[in-house]
Amino acid sequence: MAVARPPERVVFVCDCMIDICSALFNVSGRELRASGRATTSVSRVRQIAMYVTHVIMGLSMSEVGRGFGRDRTTVLHACHLVEDMRDDADFDAIVAMTERVAGAALRGLECRW
């Protein structure tokens, strides 16, 4: 059975991830939080952020969707896309670096639900 996490904690973790990715990739947080479609580069950063939030922080896809203002199926698509693209060594290095930074920055949060 899934753990019921307080919605404000889910949003906090997602906001932290958006801020981390905004700094790492030089994309504004406003662009990453914007509803609707974005340029490919902004979408890719958002997809990486959603993937890392799901994989590293252990949030469900529904929680990540709520935190990013997206649907669960959008998060599912992002995770599949990032996984597929990790076959490219350069892209994999970028995602791995994002995972390391996020893991270090948010260490311990997953234990405080």
Image (spheres, rainbow, N blue to C red):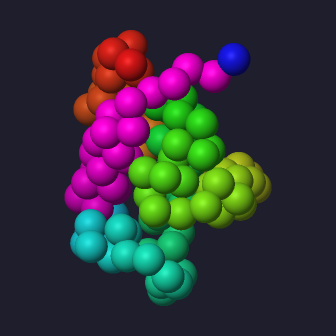
* Image quadrant in which the N terminus is located: top right
Pick the residue in front: 26 or 59: 59
Pick the residue in front: 92 or 5: 5
Residue 55 drawn at (x, y percent): 57, 35
Q: How many marks?
A: 0
Residue 93 can be seen, yes or no: no
Image quadrant assignment for residue 42: bottom left
Residue at the extreme top of the image, as rendered = 111
Image quadrant assignment for residue 18: bottom left
Considering only vertical position in the picture, is 110 above or below 74?
A: above
Considering only vertical position in the picture, is 24 above or below 6?
A: below
Residue 46 can be seen, yes or no: yes
Residue 22 sits inside the magenta stretch = yes
Image point 33% across, 16% down: which residue? 112
Residue 2 drawn at (x, y percent): 63, 22
Q: Mostly what secondary structure, the magenta segment?
A: helix
Residue 33 drawn at (x, y percent): 36, 68
Residues in magenta, as a range: 2-24
Considering only vertical position in the picture, is 14 above or below 7?
A: below
Image point 30% across, 50% down: which residue? 15
Image quadrant assignment for residue 71: bottom right
Image point 33% across, 64% down: which residue? 25
* Image quadrant in which the C terminus is located: top left
Judged left or right of residue 64, residue 106 is left
